[in-house]
Amino acid sequence: MIFNLGYLMLVTALLLAIFGAVAGVLGGQRRNARLIVSNYRAVYAVGALIFAATAILWYGLLTDQFQLDYVWNHSERALPNFYKFSALWGGQAGSLLFWSLILSAYGVGVALAFRQRQLTLMPYVNAVMLVTTAFFLVLMVFSANPFKMYAFVPADGRGLNPLLQNYWMIIHPVMLYLGYVGLAVPFAFAVAALLSKQLGNQWVSAVRRWTLIPWMFLSVGILMGSQWAYLELGWGGYWAWDPVENASFLPWLTATAFLHSILIQERRGILKVWNMVLIWLTYFLVILGTFFTRSGVLESVHSFARSDVGPYFLGFMGLIAIGFLWLLFDRLPLLRAEHEIESVTSREYAFLLNNWLFVGITFTTLWGTIFPMISEIITGSRISVNEPWFNKVNGPLFIMLLLLMGVGPLLGWRRTSVEGLRRQFTWPVLITALFAVGFAYYSPQPYPVVGLAVCMLVTATIVQEYVRGVLARRITTGENPLVATANLIRRNGQRYGGYIVHLGIVMMGVAIIGNGFYQSTTNVTLARNDSVSLAGYTLIYTGLSQERASNHVQFTTTMNLYDARGRMLGLVQAHRNVYDKTEDMITSEVGLYTRLSEDIYVVLNGWEGAGETATFTIHVNPMTVWLWIGGLVLVAGTLIAMWPHPARREQLAHVAAGQVAAA
């Protein structure tokens, strides 16, 4: 039967992954061409087998093959097809298969991209990718088989978790996995560099773009998850430092630090050991986060699966930690820095401080995430660490990071003179000071004044860098401002794309500060045609309706929204969904009216009778839309930063030609 074939494909892929990993290591050590060719072919074959197995499981989901345990547990006949499709990553075994699919796709992509380049590193890179793939195949073959079948065919399935029946959950996990899983690629290059003893800047140059790609996807995935929480969970916020949120955020922090510090290694030949540790830590946190979400050791609103995969993860994490650190220690003599940091007023020193802050936030977040588990082990009772603790500890660290984001790019390499400091910082500091004084006049709270002032400083430094770059091009080429800006970005996309990324982060910072310090909230019960006023807005409740969908009933309340002048802005409709299979898991769909200045956010808590009265929680969330706009700007900046500019394309072509000639 086809589902037995799917399981056989996973077993075959596991055997080929092990063979390919061994062939890669031996082929790289002995420079044996036949073993290296076998290594590449194993990568392609494993990718093809996992894709075929995934297609079979998708077939089972889309055609209601309820004899499959996975389909019965995560689907039903009345489930819309797009949710049947996304049910692949809605449960334990399916999500592991999806993890393996994306990992194998990255493996194939890297093997194809570097088949004529990085010839010394690639057998080891392929081997590391195959070892990681083999680990997830072991989980599916021995613990979480997605093709487990019953001896009979049930009439219908249990249905998909209602919290996952949201359009953001169709695309959010895909983006998250593309980022999460893709961070295995730079780790594979780091291990390859250690194994091959090619520990110059060659591996760093190769992985910059292959780190930016998953970093961008991970950023988008985190933001989409925040959007899902904002719209689906109905508590008025988008980030609660939930364990699974933290699991995705931790490797993002260390990957961001790595992207900054490899610039120093490329430019100055320092921080070589630090970069190795950072990318190992990033990969380790990816596996640790997957362990958190798949083993059930931490409780979360996002955790939908429980199984016995925990011991496998612990063993693999032990292997990663011991194996990598032993290899790093053995290669330490080859990782000596070529220069030293010469001054605290240098860009290198600012980047190093940036790295320390990222790592500091990483460990405070990790500690807060695992503390409930540790407290239960030691005391027998689970002590939770909630959002206020994370905000109190990490908030000042993030403000310092924002400050360095503005200061660092203005400093010179090696050292910056007093005159250079005056020239670079006069206008940004003056503009920031004027803004801080003006804003402090209207806001009695010091923390948002400081936070927004830092955001203004970063914005001013970015604008100054663009203005100076454009003026320099106009003087040398005579280009008009638009053409000069376009060519400035085209010729130095890494630098100016990075500034755009920083601008996106500033926008998100403004949204976080506005939402965190200036949110207005009320809870109210209204009869039909009653009104409530909040933060200059008036909402009038007009009634309740219900509509039958394929697998649930949706109850909808409608409110008319008016501004302070009495002008009607539109309708705000809040929903409650009652699902046929899980009537005890009622979900909310918030009513939302979005403006550039704020969101009017309405949650339906309940009603009486046919909706003669209804109870609502209403929030006015200042600046929240800039969180999502900032995300779009961040993506645009990342795409610019990873796009090869003309000089870099010529450099890459020369490097590739030299490597082919040497081979």
Image (cartoon, rainbow, N blue to C red):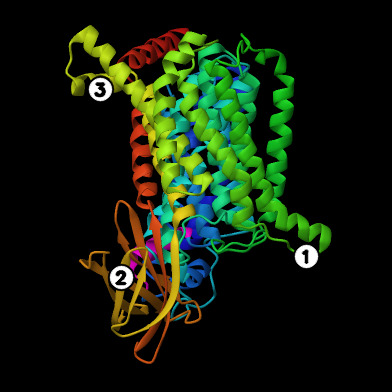
How far separated are the C-alphas under marks 1 and 2?
Answer: 46 Å
Compared with residue 115, is residue 583 higher up or lower down, i.e. above or below?
below
Compared with residue 146, is residue 354 higher up or lower down, i.e. above or below?
above
Upstream in sequence: badge 3 or badge 1: 1
Residue 441: x, y in percent? 43, 44
Q: Say which element carries label 3.
A: helix
Amino acid type at circle 1 is Ser
How far separated are the C-alphas under marks 3 and 2?
Answer: 45 Å
Closest to the observer: 598 or 242? 598
How far separated are the C-alphas under marks 3 and 1?
Answer: 59 Å
Q: Residues within 10 Å of mark 1 (few under 14, many from 20)?
A: few
Res. 538 mark:
2
Res. 381 mark:
1
Instruction: Answer with left or right where residue 155 lies relative to residue 21.
Output: left
Closest to the observer: 389 or 243? 389
Compared with residue 175, is residue 88 higher up or lower down, i.e. above or below?
below
Contact (CB < 8 A) between labels 3 and 2?
Answer: no
Amino acid type at circle 3 is Thr
Query: Quarter of the image holding residue 400?
Result: top right
Outermost residue, bottom side: 609
Q: Residues within 10 Å of mark 3 (few under 14, many from 20)?
A: some
The residue under the point 44% across, 54% down is: 515
Instruction: Answer with left or right where residue 470 lies relative to residue 304.
Output: left
Residue 6: x, y in percent? 48, 56
Which contiguous range is marked in magenta? Answer: 79-89
Upstream in sequence: badge 1 or badge 2: 1
Q: Is residue 85 magenta?
A: yes
The residue under the point 57% across, 17% down is: 31
Res. 485 mark:
3
